[in-house]
Image (spheres, helix red, strand yellow):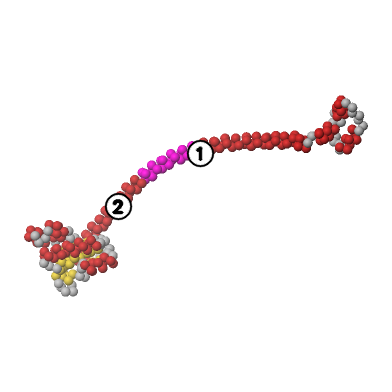
Amino acid sequence: MKALTFKSSEEIEKEAEKYVINTFADLLRALREHPDWVAELRRLFLTTEFLEIPRKIEEILETLKSLDKRVSTLEEDVAILKEDVAVLKEDVAILKEDMAVLKGDVAVLKGEVVVLKSDVNHLKGEFGRFKGREYERKVKEKYYAILGRILKGSRILSFEEILPILEQAEEEGSISAEEFEDVLRLDLLIEGKIKATLKPVILGIEISYRLYEEDLERSLKRALILGKILKKEVIPTVVGAEISEGLKEKAEEVGVLVIHSEW
């Protein structure tokens, strides 16, 4: 086959002048002998847009191939995404189960914390009561040392000694049954003489490791009842290891003797 060579329009035109073309057959023969004339005829007869169609079709085909690849990649990505979503759903289901178990554990833990708090509060109460009883025991044992700087010749006045007087006062109506019981709740009765004046007195004592205002009130109320019955001076007294400055001021206002002792 004769190799196809590309010539300019001027060269093709000079060659064509050598041919005498009378019939369509003459034209076909000339075109067969000169294939490069065909392109020139196309250029003359066809518009630029029409000539661009094959190239554009190729571009479209390339674009479609590229789209096919992208669609294929997208389908693969979608498949992977579906798998990931399935795994995620399984993870969420497991997480929900774990959360349910965790909520159950938290509920149990809350219950145990409530019980623990109750136990701690109970223990605190028991320890407080134990500390109070132990403190009261020590004060009663060492009363002479605690009150030694105030009283001379001090001694414990037992309730057995005053009980007949209290009972008689209740029978006579001098005190009520409630007042009778209230006096017997005093923690300690100490009889002695005030060192400075040698005046005989009785201390009606309330003992508490930590003193509160109600201790002052109880001591004052019971001392007044007892003083009325015994017809002696009964000094309302509180003994404690812990007392606030405000309570000391309150005690001074109402006339209650405050004795601070670490025992």
**Residue drawn at point x = 88 percent, y = 26 percent:** 23
Query: Is residue 101 located in the magenta-colored stretch of the structure?
Result: yes
According to the picture, the residue beneath numbered tag 2 turns out to be 121
Residue identifier under label 1: 88
Q: Position of residue 25 (x, y in %)?
A: 87, 25
Classify residue 47 by image quadrant: top right
Q: Amino acid at mark 2?
A: Asn
> x, y percentage for residue 210?
26, 61
Front one among 98 and 10? 10
Q: Residue 193 at x, y = what percent?
A: 15, 70
Q: Quadrant of the C terminus?
A: bottom left
**Foreground disc of the pair 1, 2:** 1
Q: Could you tell me how far apart the alpha carbons at marks 1 and 2 are, in whole angstroms?
A: 47 Å
Task: Tell me what residue is drawn at x 23 percent, y 57 percent.
Answer: 133
Mark number, residue 253: none
- Left/right placement of residue 109 relative to residue 61 reads left
Q: Which residues are magenta?
A: 88-109
Q: Please, what secondary structure does the residue beneath circle 1 have?
A: helix
Q: Residue sitting at 22 percent across and 63 percent down?
A: 216
Residue drawn at (60%, 35%) of the image: 75
